[in-house]
Amino acid sequence: QVQLVESGGGLVQPGGSLRLSCAASGSILSIYTMGWYRRAPGRQRELVVSITSDGRTNYADSVKGRFTISRDNAKNTVYLQLNSLKPEDTAVYYCNANLVSATIAYGNYWGQGTQVTVSS
């Protein structure tokens, strides 16, 4: 069974940094796009950034220049470096992956979410 497990959230002051990680495990054959979404209180879930298997990225305008996504295909892991954090970045951050597993030809998977709180 495929699982996405996130780590790295926490409380940080404005202007601070965090690094999120998301590791995919299970009978994975190939991972296509991986990404990070977030849901702030009272708002809908939104795309933060995605990355394809060959490294093409798509950032939300609100995080361009501050957040950086990367992935390690050998480890089935995606990272999100969050710099210059603002209070409006406070949200639950979710990892997402489109992949092929040994049991499902193609599927979309979500992690459980990790809380990022930016506050002084």
Image: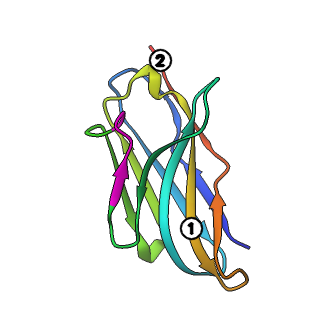
User: Which colour assignment does the render follow?
Assistant: rainbow
Q: Quadrant of residue 81?
A: top left
Quarter of the picture containing the C terminus is top left
Give the camera-side residue of 113 and 41: 41
Front position in the image: 36 or 44: 44
| Mark 1 or mark 2: whose residue is earlier in sequence | 1
Q: Quadrant of the N terminus?
A: bottom right
Mark 1 and mark 2: Cα distance apart in space = 33 Å
Residue 62 position in % (x across, y down): 36, 33
In the depicted view, which residue is nearer to us: 84 or 120? 84
Answer few, some or many: residues within 10 Å of disc 1's Cα (few below 14, many 20 plus, some between 14 and 19).
some
Q: Residue 15's spot in the image, x, y percent? A: 32, 24
Residue at 64% x, 23% y is 42
Disc 2 on helix, strand or loop?
Answer: loop
Instruction: Tell me the SS state at disc 1.
Output: strand
For the record, the magenta segment spans 57-63
Q: Residue at x 64, y 56 (%)?
A: 110
Q: Is residue 47 left or right of residue 114?
A: left
Is 63 located above or below residue 2 in the figure?
above
Q: Quadrant of residue 93?
A: top right
State the residue at coordinates (68%, 86%): 102
- Residue at the spot of label 1: 98
Query: What number is the disc on residue 119?
Result: 2
Q: Amino acid at mark 1?
A: Asn
Residue drawn where x is 39% and y is 41% of the image: 60
Disc 2 marks a residue whose amino acid type is Ser
* Extreme residue in the top direction: 120
The quarter of the displayed image where residue 87 is located: top left
Q: Nearer the viewer, mark 1 or mark 2?
A: 1
